[in-house]
Image (cartoon, rainbow, N blue to C red):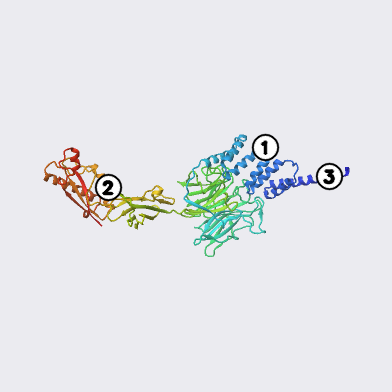
């Protein structure tokens, strides 16, 4: 029995010794940022079962390894397991909040951050993240003029980012692993980043299979490409050595990253052998993520070099004809004590960049700043759909800003960082209406509807239901005229100025372009509210608004010729009243001509008191009814 007990003790001792050795190896891998190996080893330790010393710390490290290798859901689970084991350091709350923000779970993240800040009240980064939660929860959702699309044919489960058009090609960075011979970067389990290119077909809107740009790639990390059309020169980041992974999530200093350049031969479609850019200074830190100005004289880049505000800053260097000069930090308007990365300069006056320090949705958010009088303005958040709760970066527009690319690791992608394209959402504008008889409400069939603008006219006719439709252009002013035989015409103005989204102008959508028009009577029609001074034929100002309605009616019924009639009351001498009524009728005609109505369409006639409405009028009210101005349509073609 004693012998058996001794053997059991030896077996247990060997087992414990083996477990300790595996744990030591796991800790070493974790400390060396080889998180893929660390995960495997920690899992082996935990699978042994039984009581494990420092189980809370091990599970926290597992959670961290999952976080660094891009598996946030697993990381959250293991942070909670670490807490259940008794892990007390509030860092797990911070990391849980960071993941939740990236998942858009702002209310939950806010609770975690408040718990963390209760223990670490002076933590600036946690305070910034809490402000991000408040921003995201309060920001108004705006309808965007752009449509975004995940370019699934370019993306893989690995990282693809920073797509840049060059001629008919699109060049981007990828950490994909395409064969078993590809080296794996143990920090995140992906391949070393390389530059790839694809050809875009405008006809069928598709991309060719992406191929590696072997001339530009080295055995290690290459990427973050920018191209100057004026000089036919590309600039990109090159990081040499096993520690050279240029990863936006890695806040630790990365060694050996420089900016290389290569010239493009458009005729041959080839690139020259890359070489480091010539500097007139010794860089005091890494240089990467370049963006070249349109004239090729300014090179913007991101760096943590000495003189940075904090974290990664945006810098610019100017070419002096042979070398790039001493870099200038863009200052605290752009840079914060956190990371500002992936600068992209547009037309030399707008700077796009990603920031952790400016308030946004969480992670890296895209911002832009406009240069005025040599000074960069306050950064503006691009908001959704460009920004999300995840990391959003490396936005590139085409020349007229109608389309472009950006990168994001938001949920719903192929995996890790993905390339997204965007384009102005097509704006489809139409007007729909119905033409009816104002008295009976019946549909008017084959009524002519004319759509006119500064560019000309378009004509259609109403269908059996009295309906019409026109397709409209953006940013135009229109007039819609309705003309039907035997009816007074009508018109209405419509503008599409400033319309950014598809829209139907119709009664159903709150924009009424239905018309109810009146049949032309054979009798005369009284013009209301026409006034003259006593014993005068001069029109008073208060008469003109009513006459302006008649002007519009005549404009809208272009084939109608009218006679203006004037009647007096029965008081006074007939001959005198006849002359007065003729002059009053003529004064109306003169006003209509002044307003643009053709004289050939107009005539006038005075009737004095020969056609009273009320014969032998007694009261002033009855006399007023006899004093009237009317018009009568003589013909309508």
- Tell me the residue that label 2 is attached to: 549
Q: Does the image show residue 353?
A: yes
Q: Secondary structure at mark 2?
A: helix
Whole-angstrom CA distance, mark 1 to mark 3, is 36 Å
Q: Earlier in the sequence, mark 2 or mark 1?
A: 1
Image point (49%, 62%), residue name: 203
Quadrant (top left, top right, bottom left, bottom right) of the N terminus: top right
Residue marked by disc 3: 8
Q: Which mark is residue 88?
A: 1
Label 3 element class: helix
Residue positioned most to the bottom: 268
From what the image shows, is residue 13 above or below residue 279? above
**Residue 484: where, in percent of width, then height?**
30, 55
Mark 3 to mark 2 CA distance (whole Å): 110 Å
| Residue 618 shown left or right of residue 36 in the figure | left
Disc with the residue nearer the chain's start (3 vs 2): 3
Residues packed near mark 1 inside 10 Å, few (<14), some (14 to 19) or many (20 plus): few
């Amino acid at each position: 029995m004693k012998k058996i007990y001794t053997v059991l003790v030896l077996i247990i001792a060997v087992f414990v010794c083996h477990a300790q050795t595996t744990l030591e190896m796991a800790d070493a891998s974790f400390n060396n940022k080889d998180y893929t190996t660390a995960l495997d080893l920690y899992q082996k330790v935990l699978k042994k079962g039984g009581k494990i010393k420092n189980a809370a710390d091990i599970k926290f490290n597992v959670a961290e390894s999952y976080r660094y290798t891009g598996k946030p859901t697993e990381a959250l689970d293991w942070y909670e397991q670490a807490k259940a084991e008794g892990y007390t350091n509030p860092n797990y709350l911070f990391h849980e909040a960071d993941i939740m923000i990236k998942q858009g779970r702002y209310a939950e993240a806010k609770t975690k951050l408040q718990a963390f800040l209760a223990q670490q009240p002076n933590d600036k980064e946690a305070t910034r993240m809490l402000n991000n939660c408040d921003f995201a929860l309060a920001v108004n959702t705006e309808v965007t003029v752009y449509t975004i699309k995940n370019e699934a044919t370019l993306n893989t489960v690995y990282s693809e980012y920073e797509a840049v058009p060059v001629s008919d090609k699109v060049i981007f960075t990828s950490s994909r692993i395409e064969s078993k011979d590809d080296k794996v970067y143990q920090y995140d389990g992906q391949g070393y980043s390389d530059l790839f290119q694809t050809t875009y077909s405008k006809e069928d809107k598709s991309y060719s299979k992406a191929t590696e740009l072997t001339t530009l790639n080295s055995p290690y990390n290459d990427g973050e490409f920018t191209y100057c059309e004026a000089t036919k020169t590309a600039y990109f980041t090159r990081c040499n050595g096993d520690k050279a992974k240029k990863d936006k999530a890695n806040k630790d200093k990365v060694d050996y990253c420089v900016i290389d350049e290569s010239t493009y031969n458009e005729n041959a479609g080839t690139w020259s052998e890359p070489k480091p850019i010539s500097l007139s200074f010794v860089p005091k830190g890494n240089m990467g993520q370049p963006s070249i100005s349109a004239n090729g004289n300014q090179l913007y880049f991101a760096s943590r070099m000495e003189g940075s505000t904090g974290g990664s800053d945006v810098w610019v260097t100017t070419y002096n004809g042979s070398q790039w000069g001493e870099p200038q930090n863009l200052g605290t308007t752009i840079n914060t004590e956190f990371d500002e990365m992936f600068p992209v300069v547009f037309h030399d006056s707008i700077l796009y960049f990603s920031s952790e320090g400016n308030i946004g949705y969480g992670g890296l958010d895209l911002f832009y700043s406009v240069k005025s009088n040599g000074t960069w303005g306050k950064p503006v958040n691009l908001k959704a759909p460009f920004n999300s709760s995840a990391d959003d970066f490396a936005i590139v527009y085409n020349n007229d800003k109608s389309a472009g690319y950006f990168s994001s690791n938001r949920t719903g992608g192929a995996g890790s960082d993905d390339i997204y394209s965007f384009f102005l959402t097509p704006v489809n504008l139409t007007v729909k209406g119905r033409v009816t008889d104002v008295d009976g409400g019946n549909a008017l069939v084959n009524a002519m509807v004319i759509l006119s603008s500064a560019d000309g006219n378009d004509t259609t006719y109403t269908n059996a239901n009295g309906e019409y439709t026109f397709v409209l252009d953006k940013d135009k002013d229109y007039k819609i005229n309705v003309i039907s035989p035997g009816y007074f015409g009508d018109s209405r103005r419509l503008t599409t100025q400033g319309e950014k989204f598809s829209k139907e102008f119709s009664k159903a959508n709150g924009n009424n372009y239905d018309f109810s028009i009146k049949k032309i009577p054979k009798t005369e029609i009284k013009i209301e509210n026409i006034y003259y001074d006593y014993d005068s034929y001069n029109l008073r100002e208060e008469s003109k608004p009513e006459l302006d309605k008649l002007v519009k009616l005549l404009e809208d019924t272009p084939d109608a010729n009218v006679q203006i009639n004037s009647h007096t009351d029965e008081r006074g001498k007939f001959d005198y009243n006849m002359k007065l009524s003729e002059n009053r009728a003529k004064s109306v005609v003169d006003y209509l001509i002044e307003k643009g109505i053709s004289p050939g369409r107009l005539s006038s006639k005075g009737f004095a008191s020969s056609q009273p409405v009320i014969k032998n009028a007694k009261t002033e009210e009855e006399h007023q009814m006899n004093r009237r101005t009317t018009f009568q349509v003589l013909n309508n073609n």
